[in-house]
Image (spheres, helix red, strand yellow):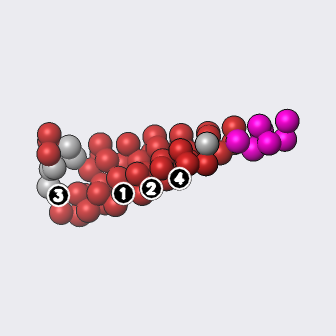
Amino acid sequence: MKLWINVCLIIGAVSLLAGIVSKIVGATWAFSLVARSFLGFADALFLLAIALGVREIFKAKG
């Protein structure tokens, strides 16, 4: 489970950086993705990582 948490955090961080760069440059990427798309995807991944982490904590407590 920790692997999935780390994967979500890494991909979320990359997406966040891509969103920030896209916002500063003002350009669209492939398939007309804009900064808002990258930032929304990063939000979803960070929330998923938090939910998985909380589930892991509750599973450890029994």
Q: Nearer the viewer, mark 4 or mark 3?
A: 4
Which quarter of the figure is the C terminus placed in? top right
Q: Is residue 24 visible?
A: yes
Residue 59 placement (x, y as % from top left): 77, 37
Q: Would you name the residue on which mark 4 appears?
A: 6
**31 with respect to 11 (left or right):** left
Q: Is residue 44 above or below residue 21?
A: above
Label 2 close to label 1 by CB (< 8 Å) = yes
Q: Would you name the residue on which mark 3 appears?
A: 26
Q: Which residues are magenta?
A: 56-62
Q: Residue at x 41, y 48 (%)?
A: 42
Label 2, residues with CA under 10 Å away: few <14, some 14-19, many ≥20: some
Q: Nearer the viewer, mark 4 or mark 1?
A: 4
Q: Would you name the residue on which mark 1 appears?
A: 14
| Circle 3: residue type | Gly
Residue 19 placement (x, y as % from top left): 30, 55
| Circle 1: residue type | Val
Say whether residue 49 is magenta: no
Label 2 close to label 4 by CB (< 8 Å) = yes
Q: Is residue 50 visible?
A: no
Looking at this view, is 14 or 1 the one in front? Answer: 1
| Circle 2: residue type | Ile
Q: Is residue 4 above or below residue 23?
A: above
**52 with respect to 6 (left or right):** right
